[in-house]
Amino acid sequence: MKTKTLKQDKVNVITLGCSKNLVDSENLITQLRANEFDVVHDSNDEDANVVIINTCGFIDLAKQESIDTILQYAAVKSAGDIDKLYVTGCLSQRYKDDLEREIPEVDAYFGTLELPGLLARLNADYKHELVGERFITTPMHYAYLKISEGCNRTCSFCAIPLMRGGHISRPVEELVKEAQSLARRGVKELMLIAQELTYYGLDLYKRRELPRLLHALADVEGIEWIRLHYAYPSKFPTEIFDVMAERAEICNYLDMPLQHADNAVLQRMRRQITREETIELIETARAKVPNLALRTTMLVGFPGESDREFAQLCDFVRDMRFERLGVFQYSHEEDTSAHDFPDDVPAELKAERAAELMAIQEQISWEKNQERIGETYKVLFDKKEGEYFVGRTEYDSPEVDNEVLVPADKAYVRIGDFAQIHITDASEFDLFGEPVVK
């Protein structure tokens, strides 16, 4: 058991879930450090006496990971090895009453928008002047920029509006100020994130203003890449593609989760778009931005998904040949409208369908990567791992997409810098290359 002392608290902030949660943790750390707290992030050291867990509540697996982590640290607290345990984030927002009853060892639970309350519990002041300034936990050459909070969409399977509330855009000026601050600290790439990018500006400016924001961010000195994540396909503002084609700083990359391609399933999902409209949008995107890399995610095992409907999805993926694709298995979420449907696709079949769809995409990815052999790309290097320097092209986002591997025994590149890389070989999800000698 630790010996209690009068020394200053040391806080370990643990982040679970998506990049939006990561930004929330970074803002929390910024506020705590401004209050002169000693703060670490996702530390395995055992010298922190206060632990704050930022939870995810998106799907069953994420919820279970969050609960397991809370239980782990509740046991640590019961053993006397930490003094205080706090929980925040999506799971806490959605299930606060249940968590307080089931895991009372936690000192307090806070929702997604209760940062000032959490700080007050730690006897820290919420410093408004820090808005736009934040500590980053990613490598210093890239950062996530959250342009809005919440979501106004009504997808039947999604519980995010229950946890994050309605859509709230951040002003253009505030986002530019934050981007300028990040650039001064060496950030070269911004990943724009939101629950729904294309809705940006409707609440503040009464019109979709993502194109205006992109132009403003592209003007920030030092920012070389701007990447777009999580765009909703229905009523997509296609002028975004015009900005992408016009401004070199906007990566030819779009993360647009489509979820499905059978019209009956799309209707049950309340996606407000048809298969035919989706195909038209993809064709428009590729016509306006010929080198566009489209990342999407698909959801298999939605209630009532028949063999025929799943086959429609597989055919769609084969025909569209997405550059990047991920697959989720449907999770039956309380208080969503889809929860009224019977969860009638067995877990084993969901897993089989996810594997089948990923096998289709793996073949597409292999074929597309083979076409890149012999080409030269601008690559941003993130790390050295094992025998390779590891980087990404503009067509790849960190953690989820392809990587470019340069053998460390044959060449040297600087982490955090760009380099021109000639591609010499490729696998399903990696490119291999060597620097171009000037």
Image (cartoon, helix red, strand yellow):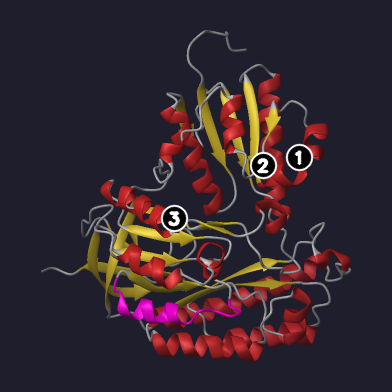
Query: In the rendered structure, are the residues bearing label 2 and label 3 in contact, judged by CB atoms less than 8 Å apart?
Result: no
Residues in magenta, as a range:
233-248
Instruction: Please identify the quarter of the rendering in which residue 172 is found.
Output: bottom left
The residue pinned by badge 3 equals: 145
Residue ID at (59%, 46%): 16
> Which mark is drawn over residue 111?
2
> Which mark is drawn over residue 362?
none
* Front-most of residues 397 and 307: 397
Kind of residue at badge 3: Leu
Whether residue 339 is in magenta: the answer is no
Instruction: Please identify the quarter of the rendering in which residue 212 is found.
Output: bottom left
Tell me the quadrant of the picture where the N terminus can be found: top right
Query: Label 3: few (<14), some or many (≥20) within 10 Å?
Result: many
State how far apart marks 2 and 3 are (Cα): 21 Å
* Front-most of residues 255 and 1: 255
Q: Is residue 315 above or below residue 342?
A: below
Tell me the quadrant of the picture where the C terminus can be found: bottom left
Query: Label 1: few (<14), some or many (≥20) within 10 Å?
Result: some
First in residue order: circle 2 vs circle 1: 1
* Front-most of residues 177 and 97: 177
State how far apart marks 3 and 1 are (Cα): 28 Å
Is residue 233 visible in the rendered image? The answer is: yes
Q: Is residue 270 above or below residue 45?
A: below
The residue pinned by badge 1 equals: 96
| Residue 346 on image: x %, y % | 83, 68
Q: Is disc 3 placed on a helix, strand or loop? A: strand
First in residue order: circle 2 vs circle 3: 2
Q: How many marks?
A: 3
First in residue order: circle 3 vs circle 1: 1
